[in-house]
Amino acid sequence: MTDCVRVIPCGMPSRVSWRDVAAFSAFAYGLSWAWWAPVVWPYLGQITLNRALPNVVERGSIRVPLGMFGPLLAATIMRLFVSRDGLKATVGFVRPWRYYGVAVAGPAVFIATIVFVDHVSGLGRFTPSRPLGLAVPTVVFIGGALGLPLTLGEEYGW
């Protein structure tokens, strides 16, 4: 069996269905933000460029991580009802391990980079309880490990 897509001959570039991309994006963002809206809405007036963002996580403790499953639901809807490809080809270890490593480590490294740039540039009010040299690895390794189950819904979808 080859790795070729059944509709597109091997070696031929695939065409992007922009309508499907738009539909997936609308589903993913729409589902997540419909879930998050009740938590975020009361704080919209407090968001400015010169103050710290309000902490909406405490008020919507379970709503925040559950909203991250919007892309997973959108991808499932698209695969089952739009493309009708099913879910079989999307589950399992069908790609090289380096892609899974990037999917797991990428978001944690991205957040750690934001913390570092935020602190060094002075744009934010990052006041770590430990030195920045320890805060960044903590975010990458411990935050990444703890957040992995919650981010799988988002990462699968995208």
Image (spheres, rainbow, N blue to C red):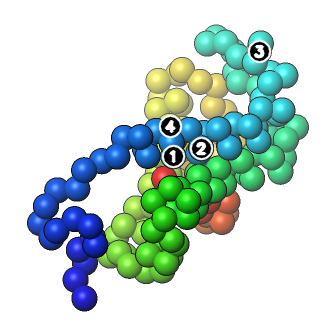
Q: Are marks 1 and 2 in contact (CB under 8 Å)?
A: yes
The picture quadrant where one finds residue 48 is: top right
| Observer-nearest of 10 and 128 | 10
Residue topped by disc 2: 27
**Mark 2: few, some, or many residues within 10 Å (few <14, many ≥20)?**
many
At x 15%, y 70%, the residue is: 10
Q: Is 157 left, or right, of 32 in this rendering?
A: left
Question: For the residue labelled by badge 1, is the local secondary structure a helix, a strand or a loop?
Answer: helix
Q: What's the residue type where badge 4 is placed?
A: Ile
Residue farthest toward the bottom in the current orientation of the protein: 1
- Residue 105 in sight: no
Question: For the residue labelled by badge 2, is the local secondary structure a helix, a strand or a loop?
Answer: helix
Residue topped by disc 1: 24
Question: For the residue labelled by badge 4, is the local secondary structure a helix, a strand or a loop?
Answer: helix
Q: Where is residue 123 in the image (x, y as percent from the top left)?
A: 54, 20
| Mark drawn on residue 46 | 3
Distance of label 4 from label 2 (alpha carbons)? 27 Å
Image vertical order of residue 42 relative to residue 48, above or below: below
Distance of label 1 from label 3 (alpha carbons)? 31 Å
Q: What's the residue type where badge 1 is placed?
A: Phe
Question: For the residue labelled by badge 3, is the local secondary structure a helix, a strand or a loop?
Answer: helix
- Picture quarter with the N terminus: bottom left
Image vertical order of residue 146 relative to residue 120, above or below: below
Q: Position of residue 66 (x, y in %)?
A: 75, 53
Distance of label 1 from label 2 (alpha carbons)? 5 Å
Residue farthest toward the right in the current orientation of the protein: 59
Residue topped by disc 4: 114
Q: What's the residue type where badge 3 is placed?
A: Gln
- Marks 1 and 3, the one that precedes in the sequence: 1
| Observer-nearest of 34 and 130 | 34
